[in-house]
Image (cartoon, rainbow, N blue to C red):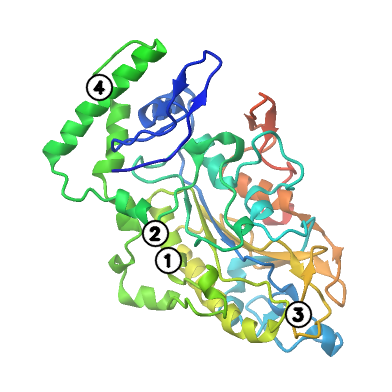
């Protein structure tokens, strides 16, 4: 049984509708999945399969210790790590990232990301918006936007998938669909949700019986709404039942189907990489591989939260544990996308909510620094092998080509084939809202 929880709500016609249907089907706001599919076809929504993999580095990664080292700065600024040469002449990154360094021609580094809020939250990274400036219902995350605009590539695979673990600091967890509604909540394949995706002991006859029951309940609902009863199973209902009868999603998440050499390339999960990993901040290397398999299966947006970088103390001890793991997983993912011919269609973005202070504190840590941050970008047919922007000699400020979160979102949408200058979605007040704060993609990348 596939269960999508919801709430009872009342429309202006004062008719109560359930926002959840628990019979092996899907519903949200009174619309079953067949209804949603039917509406999308009437709207002429395109279904080209471009995709995004977003890797959210919770807590704020230290830019000075990863991609923007300052070896000539005073020791209390430059820290303990040395820069190394990369495949791009004249560009150096941290010694803890040798795999990415060896293939930096397939990455673009933004060293001058500005406009971060001083908030420990995934909100800005996954919406591109400021938390305090929201319409009624809140800004939706990018996976929910793609769910609303483009729908599923395959009815058996949700368009948006959240692979991040449940984290103790609640704002780290993804904010969800905002005013787009529960129908566009990213699927989180964990616990009971995965059990619900498997037809355990359900025969073809029983599935057919469920189809008849679904048709009967749809007919009753349509009578209540005045739509008229029609018990015929149309092709949209058949697509809805396809979610139950197909194992495509479960198979995409079954990493045992990959060759052992591929799994080894991505590395071993390290659930104890940090002293506080039991709070949900774990280095799951397997999720990089799962993300690749999910976009191949049809997902449009897959999000991963990786480890934690809020190192107010022991910055360099933690960095030696966590950064090499990120290096391995990220390099394996991007190499895999290229080898499988997905590098033109799948965009990868890696970032956190803010940077870290240039000054190392008394506990050998770095504190919050929203004045400048970094992003790594790959795939999506972007022009890689370059560094965009620069900071001053102490990595305090952007001194060349400042880039905003909105510009990166505009770039990601543009790589998906979406014209951000012309595409809007109506909010709960009926006002058209643009998809990004900035409507101009990063010119250097396109």
* Secondary structure beneath label 2: helix
* Quadrant showing the N terminus: top left
> Dot 4, crowdedness within 10 Å: few (<14), some or many (≥20)?
some
The residues bearing labels 1 and 3 have C-alpha atoms spaced at a distance of 29 Å
The residues bearing labels 4 and 2 have C-alpha atoms spaced at a distance of 36 Å
* Secondary structure beneath label 4: helix
The residues bearing labels 2 and 1 have C-alpha atoms spaced at a distance of 6 Å
Earlier residue among tags 1 and 4: 4
At a point 15% along the width and 38% down the height, the residue shown is 206
The residue that label 2 is drawn on is 293
Closer to the camera: disc 4 or disc 2?
4
At a point 35% along the width and 53% down the height, the residue shown is 192
* Secondary structure beneath label 1: helix
Percent across and percent down for residue 290 are 41, 62
Left or right position of 273 against 267:
right
The residue that label 4 is drawn on is 216
The residue that label 3 is drawn on is 69
**Mark 4–mark 2 CB contact (< 8 Å):** no
The residue that label 1 is drawn on is 289
Left or right position of 1 against 45:
left
Percent across and percent down for residue 154 are 36, 42
**Mark 3–mark 2 CB contact (< 8 Å):** no
The residues bearing labels 3 and 4 have C-alpha atoms spaced at a distance of 64 Å
């Amino acid at each position: 049984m596939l269960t999508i929880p919801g709430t009872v709500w009342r429309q202006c016609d004062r008719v109560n509708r359930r926002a959840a249907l628990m019979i092996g089907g899907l519903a949200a706001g009174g619309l079953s999945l067949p209804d949603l599919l039917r509406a999308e076809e009437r709207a002429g929504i395109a279904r080209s399969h471009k995709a995004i993999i977003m890797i959210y580095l919770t807590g704020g990664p230290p830019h000075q210790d990863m991609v923007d080292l300052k070896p000539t700065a005073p020791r209390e600024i430059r820290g303990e790590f040395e820069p190394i040469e990369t495949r791009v002449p004249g560009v150096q990154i941290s010694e803890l990232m040798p795999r990415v360094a060896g293939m930096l021609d397939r990455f673009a580094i933004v060293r001058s990301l500005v406009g971060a809020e001083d908030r420990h939250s995934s909100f800005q990274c996954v919406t591109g918006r400021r938390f305090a400036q929201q319409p009624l219902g809140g800004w939706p995350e990018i996976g929910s936007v793609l769910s609303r605009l483009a729908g599923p590539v395959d009815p058996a695979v949700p368009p948006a998938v959240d692979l991040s673990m449940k984290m103790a600091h609640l704002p780290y967890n993804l904010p969800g669909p905002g005013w787009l509604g529960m129908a566009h909540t990213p699927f989180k394949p964990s616990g009971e949700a995965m059990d619900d995706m498997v037809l355990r002991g359900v025969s073809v006859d029983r599935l057919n019986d469920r189809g008849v029951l679904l048709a009967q309940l749809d007919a009753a609902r349509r009578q209540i709404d005045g739509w008229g009863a029609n018990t015929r199973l149309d092709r949209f209902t058949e697509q809805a039942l396809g979610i139950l009868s197909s194992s495509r999603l479960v198979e995409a998440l079954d990493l045992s189907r990959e060759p052992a050499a591929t799994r080894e390339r991505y590395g071993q999960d390290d659930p104890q990489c940090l002293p506080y990993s039991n709070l949900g901040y774990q280095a799951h290397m397997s999720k990089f591989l799962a993300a690749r398999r999910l976009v191949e299966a049809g997902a449009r947006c897959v999000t991963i939260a990786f480890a934690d970088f809020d190192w107010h103390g022991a910055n360099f001890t933690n960095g030696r544990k966590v950064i090499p793991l990120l290096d391995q997983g990220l390099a394996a993912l991007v190499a895999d996308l290229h080898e499988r011919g997905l590098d033109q269609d799948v965009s990868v973005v890696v970032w956190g909510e803010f940077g870290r202070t240039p000054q190392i504190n008394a506990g050998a840590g770095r504190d919050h620094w929203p004045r400048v941050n970094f992003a790594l970008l790959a795939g999506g047919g972007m022009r890689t092998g370059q560094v965009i922007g620069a900071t001053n000699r102490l990595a305090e400020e952007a001194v060349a080509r400042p880039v905003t979160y909105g510009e990166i979102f505009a770039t990601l949408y543009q790589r998906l084939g979406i014209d951000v200058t012309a595409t809007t979605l109506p909010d709960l007040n009926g006002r058209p809202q643009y998809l990004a704060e900035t409507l101009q993609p990063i010119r250097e990348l396109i």
